Amino acid sequence: PEDILGQLGNRFQHALRAFTARDRKNLKLAAETYRENPRFSTEDAIRDVGVGEAVTSMLMKRGVPGMVERTLIRPPSTQLGPITKSERAAIMAASEMAGKYDTPLDRRSAYEILAQRAETAAARAAEAQDRAEAAPEPQAREYNAARRYSGSRVARSTARAPRAPETFGSAMSEAVIKELKGTTGRRIVRGILGSLFKGR
């Protein structure tokens, strides 16, 4: 196609024969697309090239098209068809990379790594769900906490309560001591001390 031919840098043109006036016109147009070479006529070269020849134009430095040349084309020297196993082994043994890729190495792919991470996350989520189901309900936990709290308050109040008097005598002794410590007791003590000093 013309839109592809217009973008080509290196060009190889084989023979174009001019048998009719239209062929002659196309040959002239094709010759005009090359950079002229003063040593020969491009139009004649395109018409006269034979087997193994071509009219070529290669890009030079900075992408400038070179002058047209009449060039001999070397035919392919490769083998047409598959090589034998012995030939393949000989080529591989002579290569600089011989032995480096002999042992297959199956590395872990990104898909396998991500799949393992997903399985680990799913297992952890299942364990967390099992622990949540095995734990007591919130109401039961609040009831147990309330029982522990009320039991500790009863124990503390029991520990702080004063002991009841063991006998009637001890209760009377404590009442007498309190009375003596009060105002009446102080008056009695002053009266006794005053009578003693007056007697002397």
Image: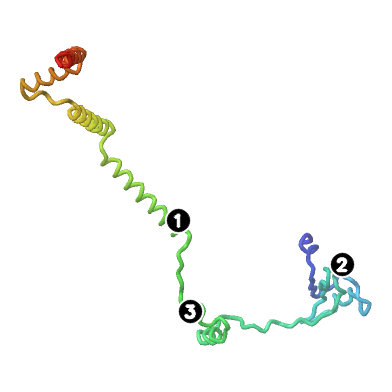
Quadrant assignment for the C terminus: top left
Residue type beneath disc 2: Thr
Measuring 79% from the left and 75% from the top, which residue is drawn there?
14
Q: Are marks 2 and 1 in contact (CB under 8 Å)?
A: no
In this picture, is 111 found above or below 163?
below
The residue at which mark 1 appears reads as: 114
Q: Residues within 10 Å of mark 1 (few under 14, many from 20)?
A: few
The residue that label 3 is drawn on is 102
Q: Residue 49: x and y, percent?
A: 83, 79
Q: Nearer the viewer, residue 49 or 107?
A: 107
Front: mark 1 or 3: 1
Q: Which residue matches tag 2? A: 33
Which residue shows up at 18% across the image and 26% down it?
161
Q: Residues within 10 Å of mark 3 (few under 14, many from 20)?
A: few
Question: Is 168 on the left or on the right of 158, as rendered?
Answer: left
Distance of mark 1 from mark 3, alpha carbons? 29 Å
Q: Secondary structure at mark 3?
A: loop
- Of residue 82 and residue 146, the one placed in the foreground of this image is 146
Q: Is residue 61 left or right of residue 166?
A: right
Residue 58 x/y as whole percent: 81, 73
Label annotation for residue 42: none
Percent position of residue 188, x then y: 16, 13
Task: Residue type at mark 1: give it.
Answer: Leu
Q: Are marks 1 and 3 in contact (CB under 8 Å)?
A: no
Q: Nearer the viewer, mark 2 or mark 1?
A: 1
